[in-house]
Image: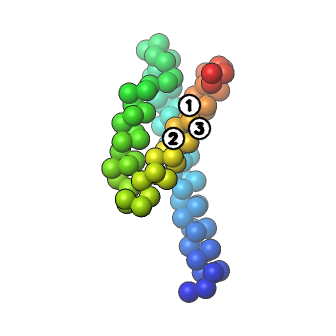
């Protein structure tokens, strides 16, 4: 394979990542609706710990720290999205 072939593979994967992230945000919005209805905080540190543990558990050993960082960032974006939808700052 040449570099262009590898880049095409990356483009396909990136497209899927975007699609999955959008699906995740759709669910995040439903979670926000539930939290607002039940008067719950956007931040849930216990859940975040579980998500990060799952990211580490489900990744190859050489990628564990990267997967953990990725999930941290995804959760930060998800919280930011929830705060913005709720009309709050994410402090």
Q: Residue at x 38, y 56 (%)?
A: 59
Task: Say if mark 2 contacts mark 3, CB within 8 Å.
Answer: no
What is the distance, in whole Å, between disc 1 and disc 2 at their CAs? 10 Å
Q: Is residue 82 something one can see in this rendering?
A: yes
| Coordinates of residue 23 in the picture (x, y in percent) | 51, 46
The numbered disc on residue 72 is: 2
Q: Residue at x 54, y 64 (%)?
A: 13
Disc 1 designates what residue?
79
Image quarter of the N terminus: bottom right
Query: Can you say whether 55 is above or below 3 in the image?
Result: above
| Coordinates of residue 77 in the picture (x, y in percent) | 59, 38
Task: Say if mark 1 contacts mark 3, CB within 8 Å.
Answer: yes
Disc 3 designates what residue?
77
Q: Is residue 4 left or right of residue 23?
A: right
Q: Is residue 79 left or right of residue 65?
A: right
- Give the crowd class for mark 1: few <14, some 14-19, many >=20 residues within 10 Å: some
Q: Secondary structure at mark 2?
A: helix
In front of the other: 49 or 26: 49
- Give the crowd class for mark 2: few <14, some 14-19, many >=20 residues within 10 Å: some
The numbered disc on residue 13 is: none
């Amino acid at each position: 394979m040449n570099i262009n072939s590898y880049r095409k593979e990356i483009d396909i994967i990136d497209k899927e990542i975007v699609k999955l992230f959008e699906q995740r945000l759709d669910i995040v919005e439903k979670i926000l609706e539930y939290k607002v209805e039940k008067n719950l905080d956007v931040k849930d540190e216990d859940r975040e710990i579980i998500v990060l543990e799952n990211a580490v558990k489900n990744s190859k050993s050489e990628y564990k720290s990267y997967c953990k960082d990725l999930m941290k960032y995804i959760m930060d974006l998800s919280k930011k999205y929830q705060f913005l939808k709720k009309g709050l700052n994410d402090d």
